[in-house]
Image (cartoon, rainbow, N blue to C red):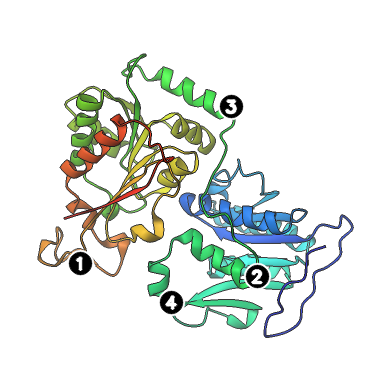
């Protein structure tokens, strides 16, 4: 039985009693890869408060494996995506029937705050329906029992994990966990080792392993391939690193551009890698050099140091968490006369601003070489934030 929660102002709600005695809690996030990884502390806090609860995550199918290693998630509710219209409608119908059949749920969190997420929320018939609103009421506010009101400025100055946790704190749920930590299965580590053995250009012995991932969800947020190449060359020369450039099926040209611009030998992986194997590969690395992206959060969650490049998107909101000694670089903002794409950049939209291109490769290389070659910190590591001019 779920312990009593503070009642919403709108009406009194009490948890239900089920045959198995387990309260049901549904979290709706939908996407993306990194955003889903950042939910791990949210689930850990829920599990700490209600050890016997049935915890389910509703997420778009492509991101279902992002929390596959999280033992606090009892069920993945797959939200269909990327299918033809007929198949998509049939998939949605099956999913909604499944959610409704196990309702009414005791508690549901809508972290996606869009119309598709709301459909899942309504199907759950949850007794408590919780979301947050930024600078005004959420769409269809009357359908929620609890709304955490915040401002865009506050969100911009708060890490995403902490914003999620504020929803729990509003319900008087303690939030001792805020750093994503995910285990890696032995099978996924072996899959990563097999992948590395197939990379013929990678030396078999010696040298720390550096993964370079030049992709991101928006072309505007990608550091130039030539800059990745300059940093990678220095890591090979000065830190004796073994470099592997990663590019998924959607961005093989980007990875090949980095490799083509390098003067030192490196390996290239552009084959499709499933999410569990990617976790294994990231856990094997000594450093990940990347843009602000999903793999950045995946690497941090398995304890791998990250060297990440940020543009106008908030490095406070999306920084890799943990004590592995992460490095984040961000151009000084606003760019003003130093704008690299005048007339094209949209300063109000991080997906359409090219500020990341102003981060100097020399600064990144200096810090990355030092990070890779220094002895482990006696204090358990640190995360360094660097602002580039």
Which residue bears the numbered disc 4? 151
Asked where in the image residue 121 lies, by quadrant, the reply is bottom right
- In this view, the residue farthest toward the top is 205
Mark 2 vs mark 1: which is more N-terminal? 2
Q: CA distance from mark 2 to mark 1?
A: 38 Å
Which residue bears the numbered disc 2? 172
Q: Is residue 358 left or right of residue 250?
A: left
Q: CA distance from mark 4 to mark 2?
A: 21 Å
Could you tell me if residue 86 is visible in this image?
no
Q: Is residue 237 left or right of residue 168?
A: left
Mark 2 vs mark 3: which is more N-terminal? 2
Q: Are marks 4 and 1 in contact (CB under 8 Å)?
A: no
Q: Which residue does the image show at 81% across and 57% down from the upper left?
A: 22
Mark 4, Cα crowd under 10 Å, few <14 / some 14-19 / many 20+, is few
Position above or below: 260 against 101: above
Which residue bears the numbered disc 1? 334
Q: CA distance from mark 4 to mark 1?
A: 21 Å
Position above or below: 183 against 199: below
Position above or below: 362 against 58: above
Q: CA distance from mark 2 to mark 3?
A: 37 Å
């Amino acid at each position: 039985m779920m312990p009593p929660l503070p009642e919403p102002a709108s009406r009194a709600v009490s948890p239900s009693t089920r045959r198995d005695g387990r309260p049901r809690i549904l979290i709706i996030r939908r996407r993306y890869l990194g955003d889903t990884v950042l939910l791990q502390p949210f689930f850990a806090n829920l599990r700490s408060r209600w050890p016997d609860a049935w915890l389910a995550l509703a997420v778009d199918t492509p991101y279902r494996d992002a929390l596959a290693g999280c033992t606090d998630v009892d069920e993945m509710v797959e939200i269909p995506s990327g299918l033809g219209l007929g198949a998509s409608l049939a998939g949605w119908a099956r999913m909604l029937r499944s959610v409704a059949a196990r309702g009414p749920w005791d508690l549901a969190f809508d972290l996606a705050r869009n119309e598709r997420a709301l459909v899942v929320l309504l199907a759950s018939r949850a007794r408590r329906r919780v979301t947050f609103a930024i600078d005004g009421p959420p769409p269809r506010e009357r359908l929620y029992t609890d709304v955490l009101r915040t401002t865009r400025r506050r969100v911009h100055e708060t890490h995403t994990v902490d914003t999620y946790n504020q929803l729990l704190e509003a319900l008087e749920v303690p939030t001792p966990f805020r750093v994503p930590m995910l285990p890696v299965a032995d099978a996924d580590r072996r899959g990563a080792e097999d992948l590395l053995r197939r990379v013929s250009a990678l030396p078999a012995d010696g040298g720390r392993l550096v993964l370079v991932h030049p992709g991101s969800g928006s072309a505007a947020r990608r550091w130039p391939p030539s800059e990745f190449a300059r940093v990678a060359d220095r890591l090979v020369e000065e830190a004796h690193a073994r470099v592997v450039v990663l590019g998924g099926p959607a961005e093989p040209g980007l990875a090949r551009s980095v490799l083509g611009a390098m003067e030192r030998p490196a390996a290239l992986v552009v084959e499709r890698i499933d999410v569990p194997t990617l976790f294994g590969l990231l856990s094997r690395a000594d450093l990940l050099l990347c843009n602000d992206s999903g793999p950045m959060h995946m690497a941090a969650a398995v304890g791998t140091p990250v060297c990440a490049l940020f543009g106008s998107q908030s490095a406070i909101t999306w920084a890799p968490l943990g004590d592995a000694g992460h490095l984040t670089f961000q151009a000084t903002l606003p760019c003003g006369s130093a704008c690299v794409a005048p007339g094209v950049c949209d300063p109000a939209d991080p997906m359409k601003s090219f500020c990341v291109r102003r981060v100097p490769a020399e600064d990144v290389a200096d810090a990355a070489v030092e990070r890779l070659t220094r002895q482990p910190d006696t204090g358990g590591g640190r995360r360094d934030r660097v602002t580039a001019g």
